[in-house]
Amino acid sequence: MGAITVHEFTTVDGVVDTPRWTMDYGFPDDLAASIGALTGSASGILLGRSTFEMFAPAWSTRTVEDDPGAPFFNDTGKYVVSSTLADAEAVWRNSTVLGGYDADRIRALKDEVDGDLYVSGSATLVRAMLADGLVDELHLYVYPVAVGAGIRLFPEGTSQRLALLGAQPLSNGVVHLTYGPAPAAG
């Protein structure tokens, strides 16, 4: 059984909504290597519908010459949590619709996939998986900017305990924070 590893770009005020603000910080080699380490151990990609619909046109036509990450995103099996998407394979090869969110189905998927499942973005899906204790590692790439509004990973009223597993400053001012489930209070 693999782990579910989540990667989110976020602002210091917690916004994970369409991260256009990342463009101002570039994509230096240490950031690429950090994300490459996450994708390198993954055997499957788990996405919510909205992220899938953003990623499919962006990645499906890229080649390794365009972006070294293209083979991972195009060749790896993709599992889409959606109650409205009918045929993900017609949109992006190696894609399967799992149906609407079901924590037990995702637990079963962890057993079915030989290796880790990688999640990028997919805030609604990630929120649900965090609440159900399905996220093994949460990788937050915190950008040194506050945008004031947008979708937050932890909406107001959310209470979530996490354990810090690592912190790494990157050359562009971003900090990569790694969290895991907090030990049971006791």
Image (tube, rainbow, N blue to C red):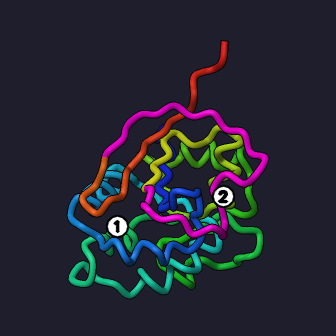
Q: Work out whether residue 35 or residue 95 is closer to the camera in this orientation and state it.
A: 35
Q: Work out whether residue 106 or residue 157 is closer to the camera in this orientation and state it.
A: 157
Residue beneath disc 1: 72
**Dividing the picture into quarters, in which one does residue 48 lie?**
bottom right
User: Relative to 109, does residue 77 appear above or below in the rendering?
Assistant: below
User: Relative to 164, does residue 39 appear above or below in the rendering?
Assistant: below
Is residue 151 within the magenta segment? yes
Q: Amino acid at mark 1?
A: Phe
Residue in the image at 37% along x and 52% along y = 175
Residue beneath disc 2: 125
Is residue 164 within the magenta segment? yes
Image coordinates of residue 43 in percent, x first then y, are 40, 54
Q: Which portion, as a residue range, is magenta?
A: 142-168
Residue in the image at 53% along x and 64% along y = 146
Q: Amino acid at mark 2?
A: Leu
Left or right, 174 with respect to 171, comes to right
Q: Work out whether residue 152 or residue 114 is closer to the camera in this orientation and state it.
A: 152
